[in-house]
Image (spheres, coloured by chain):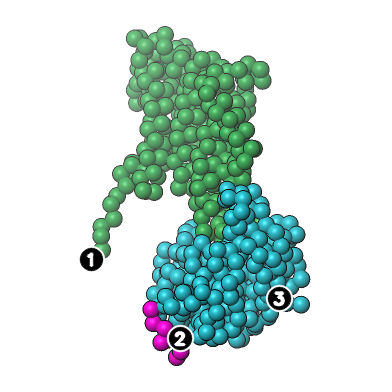
Amino acid sequence: MSLLEVNNLRVHFHDAAPDRFAVDGVSFSMEKGDILGLVGESGTGKTVTSMCIAGLLPRWKADTEGSITLDGTEIFDCTQEELNKILGREMSVVFQEPMTSFNPVYRIGRQVGESLYVHERGLSRAEKKDRVLKAMKKAGLQEPQEVYRKYPHELSGGMLQRAMIAAAIVTSPKLLIADEITTALDVTIQARILDQLKKLNRESGMAILFISHDLHVVNRLCKSVIVMQRGKIVESGRTEDVFSSPQHAYTKQLVAAIPSRGRFDE
Amino acid sequence: MGKKKKINGYLLTGGILSALLTAVIVTGFFWTPYSTTAMNAKEKMQPPSLAHFFGTDNFGRDVFSRVMQGAGTSFLIAILVVLIGCSAGILIGSLCGYFGGTADLILMRICDTITAFPAILLALVIISIAGSNVSNIILALGILFIPSFARVVRIQYAGIRDLNYIKSARLAGVGTGRILYSHILPNTIPILVPAMTIGFNNAVLAEASMSFLGIGIQPPQASLGSMLKDSQNYLTSAPWYALGSGFMIVLMILAFSLLSEGFQQSNR
């Protein structure tokens, strides 16, 4: 049994034309320890797919078909309470925009440990703090003791993004969905975060679904990749194969649009 | 070079005045210079002096002592009214703002309907039905204050519910109750505190108006509104009587208005 199985996922927003599907027949699976890249231009259905996997797409907003199972649990059949038990424990999600993803009134330490408060209530305050500090260190935050006491406005974008990763991994989830997490960051910070994700994947076997429109970043991190266009999967396979010899016209366009192709071959 | 922090004059003045007033009022609960109910025919209508700061009334009672007690009554009533209005307003406003939908529409229209009627008139109706005593006055005014708090809270919740940090909390598996009252509520405080101080002022005014009309605090218990009403007949012969209670109402409103403005300025 795969860790994550997405079968024939279709999403139709209520305010869209009847024949316009945001996600149209998407199927893929992930095993433990996989790093799968989901690429495509903006508006192609990558984030909608991730929202469906996380059970975040409100039913009043869109109709969904197909099935998504995480470790054998059908996400679409889950009640909100059941979903709350999965989110933050079995599966964590990190979005872009780190500057706005932390509550401005609470210190970073408290917010990184929120999943522990929800899912592991038996932990003492000291144990919780210890786990939070370890997660911060794993996410590549220098001086976690300092960061623990800071408020979000006192940290840079790169530090906040790493704090978000710390919040996502504090409960050691089986799957991490990283949606455009390096988009707003400069190249050096991007590289450090990618290295950190690779390290986490290597050490804990945590599967990562990495969503991005930046092929260079995907090439650097992901073992396999799925290319999406207008809600459909147009190509998938091992990252090296897809980027070195793209088959679909759209993938060829995407690869050709990369300004420094030479780096892919390094 | 560090920038010199600008002093918030409103907050400072309002804070000092409110602290002084609160000290006078709290003292009034335990001690007053003279008895507030004992009559003294010999001391009737005495002008302000060192023995009686605000003079005496038509029954020879010390106006300052009665103002201390009356202000305390108004203060307690206003605080309880704000507590009732604010708690219920937070509950209704948070649910309406966070979930929206039909329940939001219905509850907000009920709030509109309550707001459309003059508060004193509605309070008068409630008290006529339930009877005139302190707990009924508090309850009536408290109910009438719910819509103003519910509206402020609803707007805040509707604005915050879709922000990324709330999405992050949901993604961490946080339940709705904790999101409502642990994640969103603290972010509404900068708006809620000025609303509470404005509500406090309105409650002081409403209680004084009701007592002035004779449907509030009943004699012999001192109330700023009823003292103002009684003093009307002696405006020319003993103006200090009206001035004492009037001055206290103005001072209470002024102090908490300055405090409210100060909070609003510090949030900008």
According to the rendering, which colour does chain A have? cyan
Judging by colour alone, the chain drawn in green in this rendered image is B
| Labels 2 and 3 share a subunit | yes
Please provide percent x and percent y for residue B205: 46, 26
Q: Closer to us: mark 1 or mark 3?
A: 3
> Toward the viewer: B177 or A261?
A261
Q: Quadrant of the C terminus of chain A?
A: bottom left
The magenta stretch is: A259-266
> What residue is disc 2 on?
A264
Q: Quick one: SS at disc 2?
A: helix
> Crowdedness of circle 1 by 10 Å Cα count: few (<14), some, many (20+)?
few
Q: Residue at x 45, y 47 (%)?
A: B190
B163 above or below A260?
above
> What residue is disc 3 on?
A3
Number of numbered tags placed on the structure image = 3
Q: Quick one: SS at disc 1?
A: loop
Give yes or no for contact between labels 1 and 2 (Cβ–Cβ under 8 Å): no
| Label 2, label 3: how far apart the Cα atoms are | 29 Å
Please provide percent x and percent y for residue B256: 41, 36
